[in-house]
């Protein structure tokens, strides 16, 4: 593999570091909490800039409305709580107060995906990408590790103009991207070249995709791996280039297969370069309580199971062509 794990860290840590750095660079950055700070990584910012941190209690819809008002007054509010609450419970306020007015509000979605584990279905955000990416003006970001989460958080706060949803997780995962790796919002990263098939992953699944590609290489299958850290606007050029050169696309996401990364990729392919495509994710069902590694295995989101499925699809395609 071309990348090494420097040590497991959570993407919520990276989010907190990026927010802190943005606060140091711009005094107009404010953080809004919904009764949780350590869980979302906001405690770093709150400790350094207590005058710029506001705790609004367990009132996510109110947080979204207050954030919209602050943005109208020239501030840069960062509203953060668990993804099921920021992206789904507060959807109406995000849609009308923030997106309709195209306000620069950062919305952090913590504890996303099935890997939040024992918290169960009520706290496993598996539909947040689908909800957020269909809202006009919204940018949707899903970083692959802590280092990238810090970079993209800082960039989203300081460089973007409209509303931004940034998704991150609770569990410590591989931190493997070099800080000097060029990272631009809206621009996918090809982390490994390959010409037999393409694995396009987002969030925590990028590391699993890289490990899956390593397994596939032992079987003579060269898999391209693309990190789609920005799901909206999606990098259509990277998708179409991969489709033309490998003719087989497999999306991997810790999210429902409906409406998420796979759907966004399919929308690009169907009108421009229809090729064989498969989606790996949560198969239109709610999650359940369990250890993160057990749940990832059950839903086929481990490197071994991704590689097994990719090989099966690739061999079947060879036979039929």
Image: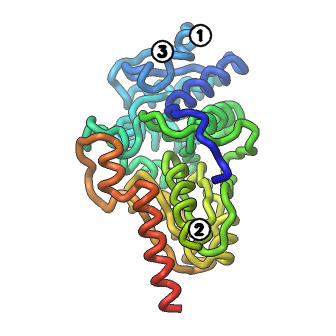
For the point 40% across and 61% down, the residue is: 305
In the rendered image, which residue does mark 3 sit on? 54
Query: Hey, which quadrant is residue 220 in on the image?
Result: bottom right
Coloured how?
rainbow
Query: Nearer the N terminus, badge 1 or badge 2?
Result: 1
Q: Residues within 10 Å of mark 1 (few under 14, many from 20)?
A: few
Cα separation, mark 2 vs mark 3, equals 44 Å
Q: Which residue is mark 2?
A: 198
Circle 1 is placed at which residue position? 48
Q: Position of residue 101 (x, y in %)?
A: 56, 40
**C-beta proximity under 8 Å, tags 1 and 2:** no
Which residue is more in the foreground, 206 or 233? 206
Residue occupying image coordinates x 66% and y 73%: 195
Image point (48%, 15%), residue name:
54
- Per the image, label 3 sits on a secondary structure element best described as strand
Crowd tier of the residue under label 3, counting other residues whose Cα lies within 10 Å: few below 14, some 14–19, many 20 or above: some
Q: Would residue 310 be seen by someone viewing this image from the given angle?
A: yes
């Amino acid at each position: 593999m071309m990348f090494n794990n420097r040590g497991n860290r959570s993407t919520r840590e990276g989010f907190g570091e990026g927010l802190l750095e943005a606060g140091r660079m711009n005094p107009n950055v404010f953080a809004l909490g919904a009764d949780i700070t350590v869980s979302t990584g906001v405690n770093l910012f709150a400790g350094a800039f207590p005058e710029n941190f506001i705790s609004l209690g367990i009132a996510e819809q109110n947080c979204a409305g207050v954030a919209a008002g602050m943005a109208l007054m020239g501030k840069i509010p960062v509203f953060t709580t668990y993804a099921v609450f920021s992206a789904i419970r507060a959807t109406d306020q995000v849609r009308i107060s923030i997106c309709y007015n195209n306000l620069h509000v950062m919305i952090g979605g913590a504890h996303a995906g099935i890997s939040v584990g024992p918290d169960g279905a009520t706290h496993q955000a598996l539909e947040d990408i689908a909800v957020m990416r269909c809202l006009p003006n919204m940018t949707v970001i899903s970083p692959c590790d802590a280092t990238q989460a810090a970079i993209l958080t800082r960039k989203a706060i300081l460089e973007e103009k409209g509303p931004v949803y940034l998704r991150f997780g609770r569990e410590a995962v591989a931190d493997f991207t070099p800080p000097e790796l060029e990272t631009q919002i809206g621009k996918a990263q090809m982390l490994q070249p390959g010409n037999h098939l393409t694995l396009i992953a987002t969030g925590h699944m990028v590391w699993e995709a890289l490990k899956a590609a390593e397994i596939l290489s032992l079987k003579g299958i060269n898999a391209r791996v693309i990190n789609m850290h920005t799901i909206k606007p999606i990098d259509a050029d990277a998708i179409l280039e991969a489709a033309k050169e490998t003719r087989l696309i497999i999306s991997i996401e810790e999210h429902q297969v409906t409406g998420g990364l796979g759907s966004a990729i399919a929308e690009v392919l169907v009108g421009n370069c229809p090729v064989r495509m498969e989606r790996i994710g949560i198969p239109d069902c709610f999650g359940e309580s369990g250890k993160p590694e057990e749940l990832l295995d059950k839903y086929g989101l481990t490197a071994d199971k991704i590689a097994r499925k990719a090989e099966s699809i690739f061999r079947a395609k060879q036979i039929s062509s």
